[in-house]
């Protein structure tokens, strides 16, 4: 079922913002939302490959989004 579009944007924005604070990245609100959503999608894909499923609720998806966005920020820094 999933969170829905609006909830995904809200959770993605929160996750991206928290990840940017943790990683000390200077990003804007739009980039925070994108990082949070893409980070959650990527990490959910990786977790599903190893048999782990994060529930379709706000808190688990927020945690997955934070970790995923942090990994994206880390990866971007390593590449540049």
Image (cartoon, grey):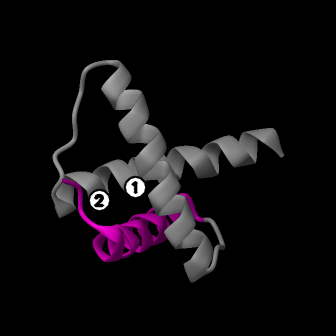
Residue that appears at 34% across and 29% down = 47
Q: Is 20 above or below relative to 10?
A: above
Q: CA distance from mark 2 to mark 1?
A: 6 Å
Q: Which mark is residue 62?
A: 2
Disc 1 secondary structure class? helix
The picture places residue 52, in percent across and down from the top left corner, at 24, 27
The picture places residue 13, in percent across and down from the top left corner, at 43, 73
In front: 24, or 59?
Answer: 59
Residue that appears at 16% across and 46% down = 55
Q: Is residue 16 magenta?
A: yes
Q: Which mark is residue 18?
A: none
Q: Is 20 above or below relative to 46?
A: below
Residue that appears at 71% across and 47% down = 76
Contact between marks 2 and 1 (CB within 8 A): the answer is yes
Q: Which mark is residue 66?
A: 1
Q: Is residue 50 left or right of residue 33?
A: left
Q: Is residue 78 left or right of residue 25?
A: right
Structural crowding at the residue carrying mark 1, measured as other residues with C-alpha within 10 Å and reported as few (<14), some (14–19) or many (≥20): many
Disc 2 secondary structure class? helix
Q: Which residues are magenta?
A: 1-24
Q: How many marks?
A: 2
The picture places residue 19, in percent across and down from the top left corner, at 47, 61
Residue that extends furthest to the front in the rendered view of this protein? 1
Residue that appears at 25% across and 20% down = 51
């Amino acid at each position: 079922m999933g969170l829905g579009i609006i909830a995904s944007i809200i959770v993605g924005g929160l996750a991206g913002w928290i990840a940017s604070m943790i990683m000390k990245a200077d990003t804007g609100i739009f980039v925070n939302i994108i990082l949070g959503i893409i980070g959650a999608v990527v990490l959910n894909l990786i977790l599903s490959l190893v048999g782990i499923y994060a529930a379709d609720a706000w808190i688990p998806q927020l945690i997955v989004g934070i970790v995923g966005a942090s990994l994206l920020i880390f990866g971007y820094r390593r590449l540049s």
